[in-house]
Amino acid sequence: MAVYKPTVSRFWAYDFQSGGRRFHGSTGETSRAKAVVHEAELRRKLKAGELSTTRATMSIDDAANRWWEEVGQHLARPANVERRVAVAVELLGLATPLNEITTAALDRAIQTRRHTLTKARKPLSNATINHDIIRTVRPILRRARLSWGVTGLPEISWRVLMLPEPKPKARDFTDDQVTAIIAALPEHWRAMAGLMARYGLRLGEVFFSLERLDIDGRRLTLTDRKGGDDHVIPLLAADVTMLAARAGRARAAGLDSPWFRVLKGGRLKALAYGGALQAIHEAMRETGLKASRGARVHDLRHHAGTRIMRATGNLRIAQRLLGHASIQSTIKYAYASDTDLREGLEKLVESRNNPGAKAKTPRKSKEKQSSS
């Protein structure tokens, strides 16, 4: 009997051939013995024509398992992806066929999730609920339709389901504040944070593999980004030198990342996403930014966008640096701060008090010239 235990589910799954077709999915059983009985009964029903092959082979749990094997486990932070898949499948019902996942069914799952509290006994944010349900289920259904050839899936009004999320305001650090944050970091995190603040890299993007670094071409290519597009960033000479030195040491140590710390004895250990998140948060707290401004690690990206916008006054250059697909995503960096407004007013007053060259005397009209 072909039953096995997938890593993403607590239920045993089946995988067998019948009538020249492959059938695989969840048994909905947590014990192997019951899973074997379930698979035998499934074979019998299929042979007797008592069960449609669509319903038998593609429940939401089946689809989630397959999507996890093909896509989910290869994404950044797979543990978070796995958790969200488990939450969505549990709320929708493991045995629910894909053709019964409608807008109404997803809305019921969303409403149930809204009553869940955090460890601090606070309601989940709308952004968390959208991630747990909509942004988790949508790619599974999309892959089922486009890659696996599943037909008869209902049309879903994703925009109606999406809970409103507050748009994050672009926070702008001063150069001194960024310098203070980097100085508060342990030595092995500083170069990474500096690169994020200069080029607007997301924390997930800064953990690029060495093959994405082109030292001779003085550029970095980011792949698997938000939105799915690749992004090429030209590097400053000082950063090329720094990254080349780090890449050389990393390759010699068998690492695929330029970010590492040196342990006792000289051995190199690759740095991790979670460690970077914790270290930068702690540095922000030490500088007082976390408490006073609610600063986030992502604000280093906002700093880079705002800084390049003020330096050039060109939205297209800011868009190019940040890799935005649409200029609309970049417009938020064109806001005017209190400092910008004050400087503008001071320049206006200065221009009025110092008008410069005197205005030219208007030329007399021909009529006046002829009469004089």
Image: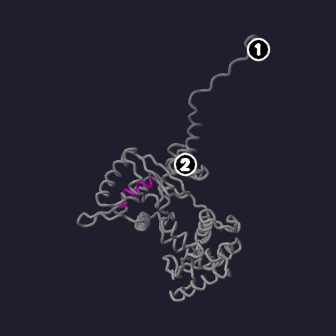
Residue 283 in picture, x, y percent from top left = 41, 64
Q: Nearer the viewer, mark 1 or mark 2?
A: 2
Name the image quarter holding residue 348. top right
Q: Nearer the viewer, residue 245 or 104?
A: 104
Question: Which region of the structure is painted magenta?
Answer: 188-197
Q: Which residue is mark 2?
A: 319
* Category of crowding for the residue at label 1, using alpha-carbon neighbours closer than 10 angstroms: few (below 14), some (14–19), many (at least 20): few
Residue 244 in picture, x, y percent from top left = 33, 50
* Image height of 10 relative to 79, above or below: below
| Secondary structure category for the residue under label 2 | helix
Residue 301 in picture, x, y percent from top left = 49, 56
| Secondary structure category for the residue under label 1 | helix
* Image height of 303 relative to 87, above or below: above
Give the alpha-carbon distance from disc 1 to disc 2, as whole Å: 57 Å
- On screen, residue 17 versus residue 156, left or right, reads left
- The three-letter amino acid code for the residue at tag 1 is Glu
Name the image quarter holding residue 34. bottom right
Q: Which residue is mark 1?
A: 367
Residue 180 in picture, x, y percent from top left = 40, 58
* Image height of 357 relative to 349, above or below: above
